[in-house]
Image: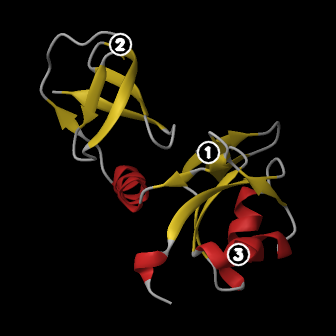
Amino acid sequence: MSNISKNWFVLFTKPRNELKVLERLTAIGIEAYTPCKIEVRQWSDRKKKTRVPLLPSMVLVSLQEKELDQVFEVPGVVRYLFEHGKRAMVSNQEVLAMQCYLENTYQTTPKELEVGDTVKVPLLEQEAILLSVKGKKCLAQLQKSGAIVSFQLS
């Protein structure tokens, strides 16, 4: 199998099953990715750090066209995400950008930005639509994957 013919697809999972599906897909040899963050959750008697997926009910899988049906062997997988009648594909560059983003904090130079502007997210080199600007903090939605990223103006 060569990586050249593999594409990243978006899978829908049952609610709150993202991490279990990711684990099961990896166990059967399918390359999968779910961007997560660590969050402190508080209960009445304790606080606990938990991994929370950034894309609710979604897992990204890297597969060849002929392997697409293998994912349905895994409990918790519902269906593929479709865009304009075709399976939604995410570029390898966008997946790498999400991985890099979660490992780093980005800075950019300030200029007059307004909600709705199309901007290039620093270091990700991805086009995104600006959702909000509060002081130096910006929220933007990547155009291809729809993931929401934040970055700070310097």
Counting every numbered tag in the picture gives 3
Determine whether, in the image, residue 148 is placed left or right of residue 108.
right
Determine whether, in the image, residue 136 is placed left or right of residue 14.
left
Q: Amino acid at mark 2?
A: Lys
In this orientation, does residue 62 appear?
yes
Please state, as top left, top right, bottom left or bottom right, where the C terminus lies in the image. Answer: top left
Determine whether, in the image, residue 20 is placed left or right of residue 123.
right
Q: Residue furthest right?
A: 75
Q: Amino acid at mark 3?
A: Leu
Q: CA distance from mark 2 to mark 3?
A: 39 Å
Tag 2: Cα neighbours inside 10 Å, few (<14), some, or many (≥20)? few
Tag 1: Cα neighbours inside 10 Å, few (<14), some, or many (≥20)? some
Which of the 4 image quarters holds residue 25? bottom right
Q: CA distance from mark 1 to mark 3?
A: 17 Å
Numbered mark located on residue 4 in the image: none
Q: CA distance from mark 1 to mark 2?
A: 23 Å
Q: Amino acid at mark 1?
A: Leu
| Label 1 vs 2, first from the N-terminus | 1
Q: Residue 89, image x and y in percent?
A: 54, 54
Given residues 90 and 46, the one toward you in this image is 90
Can you identify the residue that label 3 sits on?
Answer: 25
Can you identify the residue that label 2 sits on?
Answer: 134
Can you identify the residue that label 1 sits on?
Answer: 55
Secondary structure under tag 1 reads loop
Mark 2–mark 3 CB contact (< 8 Å):
no
Q: Residue 147, image x and y in percent?
A: 50, 39
Which of the 4 image quarters holds residue 51? bottom right
- Mark 1 or 2, which is nearer the eye? 1
Given residues 103 and 63, the one toward you in this image is 63
Q: Residue at x 50, y 74 (%)?
A: 6
Mark 1–mark 3 CB contact (< 8 Å):
no
Q: Residue at x 66, y 78 (%)?
A: 66
